[in-house]
Image (cartoon, rainbow, N blue to C red):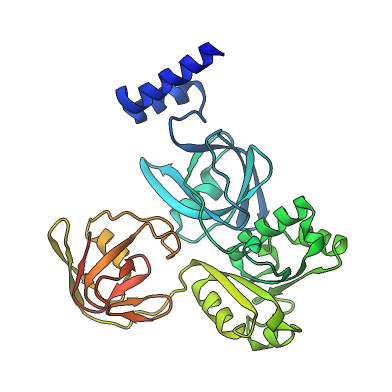
Amino acid sequence: MHVVQRKNTALNFLSGSVCDSNLLNFWMQKLNPLWSTHQMLGQICQKEYITADTVSLKIRCSKRMKFGLAGQHHPVIVEIDGRRLERTYSLTQLDDEHVKLTLKKVPNGIVSTWLCDTSKISDVIEFGMPYGDMLPQNYDDKQLILLAAGSGITPMYSMLYALAKSGELANYQVHLLYWVKYEDQAAFVDIFDEWSQKYPHFKYDVFYTQSETSTASRLNEEHAQEIENLDHKVVFACGPSGFVQLAKEIFQDAKLFDSEAFSLSPIENTEEGTVQVTLARSNKVLEIPKGQSILDALENANEKPISGCRMGICNKCACHKVTGTTKNVATQAENSEPGSLLRICVNSAKSDLVLDL
């Protein structure tokens, strides 16, 4: 016992005061790929395509892993061609050591393409701290309407899986509405069918909007009208920002509404011209185009601001706007308030700006 304590003390001393932690991690991971002085690491142990463009990775996690609550998001960091890239995904905790990462391959998506096509068994990835507040346990109500589009199904599945595993799903009344383009893109349908047979108060509908056999309608007001006692139910929505914004409008009569957008819906940029952005800390003045996210514009100008999810959720890119007017690229809302907190991944410049960067 004393030997173990001395060993841990020595390791903490080395990692904190003598050796560069990256160098120490390098040698530790020669012995065990999941060992690290501070990183939350995971190793892929199973890979399975569950739809034509969706992969589920079973990952064994290191002892340092901080598991999030079902429905939360984790930053996922991978190294591709010598670059560390971070994206945000929902994880499903399978047991004390394993998580499931389910993701859809995004056209031209560097990280999603690597995870779906290139990653292999034994590859190691890194996780960041979990975040997100769209959680059933935040509400006393047990009548849930879940709205999901595309990859928005993954946090819904995570929540439902946790409820089923704990036996709590039997105490909930759940109606899941799930939109995909084609039949071969619908994930987790087999388990949803199993749950619908096992739990009388769980039901689900899948809408195929571009099916060759029967085309279903996209989310619209009729879907809300068909739900009885909507004012007594909690509604969760997850999908592209356009889908989430529409759901918020359509389900405004719900008792409670909560949502998260996993990506920005493409919005045609009709703005012309450029503006000047002053980075107060570095005293740089840059010219960037109107209509483009400030994060993208700064990166195109060879700046490297801190960023994370690139969806306006994690706040890693947030900085204070000293002066100027910005527009949220998802909601189109404008903000001219000086000193306000600005998420540069989801805002564009409408005028000259001064940023605390």
Measured along the vertical axis of the image, is residue 227 above or below residue 97?
below
How many tags in the picture? 0
Residue 294 placement: quadrant = bottom left
Q: Quadrant of the N terminus?
A: top right
Percent of width and height locating residue 284: 13, 60
Q: Is residue 170 visible?
A: yes
302 over 253 or under it: above or below: above
Residue 188, x across and y down, in percent: 72, 58
The spot of residue 35 in percent (x, y) is 49, 28
Farthest-out residue, top = 3
Q: Is residue 42 left or right of residue 231?
A: left
Name the image quarter holding residue 349: bottom left
Which corner quadrant holds the C terminus?
A: bottom left
Q: Residue at x 68, y 84 (%)?
A: 224
Name the side, left or right, on which 59 lies relative to 283.
right
Asked whether the viewer can see residue 178, the reply is no
Q: How far across and down, in percent of the image, does residue 52 sit?
A: 64, 58
Compare residues 199 and 322 and report the one nearer the observer. Answer: 322
Kindly identify the residue that appears in the image at 60 percent across and 52 percent down.
69
Residue 219, by quadrant, is bottom right
Q: Is residue 7 above or below residue 96?
A: above
Relative placement, left or right, of 91 versus 323 is right
